[in-house]
Amino acid sequence: APTMGPARWRSVWEPQLCQGLEGFNVACAALGEGHTLVVTEGGDLHATGRNREGQLGLGTFTDVADFHKVDLLAHETISSASAGAVHSLAVTASGRLYQWGLVAVSAPAGGDGGEEDTTSGALVGMRDRGAERNERLQRVLEWSTNKFLQAEDEAESYYKELAEMGYHVEDSEDAVQAREREYHGMLKVNTKRARSPHPQLASSLSGIRIVAAAAGYAHSMAISSDGRLFACGYNDRGQLGLGHRFSTSGFEHVACLAHKFVVQVSCGQAHNVARVAPRDGGAEVGCDVACDVYVWGNGTLGQLGLGARGTHKGRLYPTLHEDMCEAEPRGCIDVAAGANFTVAVTCVGRVYSWGHSSYNEHGTAAAGADLVDSKYYYRPRPNEGLSTVEVAKVKCGSQFSLALTKSGEVYSWGWSAYGVLGHGRGHVPQVPLRVAALGGSDQQIVAVYAGANHCAAITASSGHRFATTYSGMLDDKSYADVQVHVEGYARVFYCHAALLGARSTYLRGMLRAAREDPESLVVAPLEPQDVAEEGRHNRLMIRL
């Protein structure tokens, strides 16, 4: 897929070993429109690629061709990352969320706020131009804009739908007035996007432990440890799931799912798909337990899979996908959102997809069903090209998908721009096809990732994970509290008293002796079989 060269992009038509990460065990990755983030098992974040909006978090706006450690997050232990089109998110082991790149900020309505990106969820630009031409037109546009953002004309039908789904809808006069005051305040604030090359802590999530995050084109989602969902960013299509179309610069709780436990969420261009479990079901965020599927946001191209009727409105609230409940009542174990399509994996490894189909996003170009019925994929359809394999995970790019089977094989299908399908130059399969360069007896694939137009795969670690991940830390003087000297070796080994003491009573005795005289070396003989090279002396020495 496209990789950043010194002065241009180049296409990689088949998987290649990634350079610049030698010596690291990769825990996970995230791919955006032109940038890549990698999290190591030691909790460091590395980034490469496009950086014109600061999405690499390096403190600059310069594109880079090689992986660079994000030193601005060196004080944190990163557990996962997510990449949107031109912004990035990182979740720390302590439950904090950082964001950078082209991120949402607040500015007073009518002011430019000094931002580089002036597009907002509101129709502010139309209102400003109308003011210049005609004051009456301005009032009409302002009224219609406010109605659109508040979605009052759709509220009744949405509330009815929510009630049928079992939600408790608050309809008291006090609640209505509170909601109107909230909307009135939102109208006074214009959400824009500004370039930020420095990772910023999401202060709106202070006190909430975040364990997972997802980034879309211009919006973000975060899941707390107790399964609550939070949303931030552009909301012109209702993609935040808050029941209105106001964009927000801070994360807000998606209250519609408060009585549920959100296990997973994936963001498309302006829609989302999530796996949701009962709150008392014992599920954990990110687990592969079978869950119900919920969708919301833009539905004009069938990306919600709710049928052709009323798709122009989309969904302002997370909506239970009843068709998927019928297709597999036991639920789905994975979901993914492409630009304008969606894919789900059932608990038995079957793949279903729905949404835009002009780029063979569903891997069924040969069948031609979408040519006969342009809205055929406005509802979930099984991917028959994968019926003979059991799929475990799926990831979506802009117009293509990757599937990882339980046996470790990788399949790809969709639009083959820039070689994203990994089958070589000029090879554009019409059905899902196994990526021959990945997998095999000597290369077990454990995870796949998809960006807008590039992909990544992670293989199983070839060594002991603890040893390879923490070797650098264990040999770091700033962490160590014990020096180990082996006679005949010039190198000093820096270790930890707790680990040595736990290893054996013999070493614990040496540590006790060293504490009694911390300035001297405690010498102990080694057995002959413990001496690696002939001619080496056989004495071990420890100093605290």
Image (spheres, helix red, strand yellow):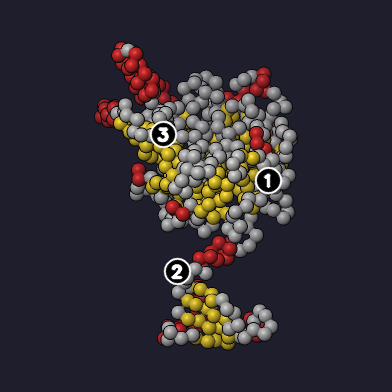
Q: Judge from the rendering whether residue 422 lies leftward or rightward of residue 174; answer left or right.
A: right
List the residue tagged with mark 3: 116
Q: Judge from the rendering whether residue 422 lies leftward or rightward of residue 393; answer left or right.
A: right
Could you tell me the amino acid type at mark 1? Pro
Q: To which quarter of the image does residue 171 belong?
A: top left
List the residue tagged with mark 2: 478
Disc 2 on helix, strand or loop? loop
Between discs 1 and 3, the one toward the N terminus = 1
Could you tell me the amino acid type at mark 3? Glu
Quarter of the picture holding the C terminus? bottom left
Could you tell me the amino acid type at mark 2? Ser
Q: To which quarter of the image does residue 234 belong?
A: top left
Between discs 3 and 2, the one toward the N terminus = 3
Give the CA separation, mark 2 to mark 1.
39 Å
> Residue shown at 73%/54% (left/top)?
441
Task: Determine crowd level at label 1: few under 14, some 14-19, many 20+ residues with C-alpha closer than 10 A.
Answer: many
Q: Are marks 2 and 1 in contact (CB under 8 Å)?
A: no
On residue 140, the disc is none
Task: Determine crowd level at label 2: few under 14, some 14-19, many 20+ residues with C-alpha closer than 10 A.
Answer: few
Q: Report the front residue among 220 and 191.
A: 191
Q: Report the front residue among 527 and 172.
A: 527
Above-or-below relation of 261 to 123:
below
On residue 15, the disc is 1
Above-or-below relation of 180 to 514:
above
> Residue shown at 37%/32% (left/top)?
191
Disc 3 on helix, strand or loop? loop
Q: Residue furthest front?
A: 7
Q: To which quarter of the image does residue 40 belong?
A: bottom right
Q: Position of residue 336 (x, y in %)?
A: 56, 38
Query: Residue 301, can we see it?
Result: yes
Quarter of the picture holding the N terminus? top right
Give the CA separation, mark 3 to mark 2.
42 Å
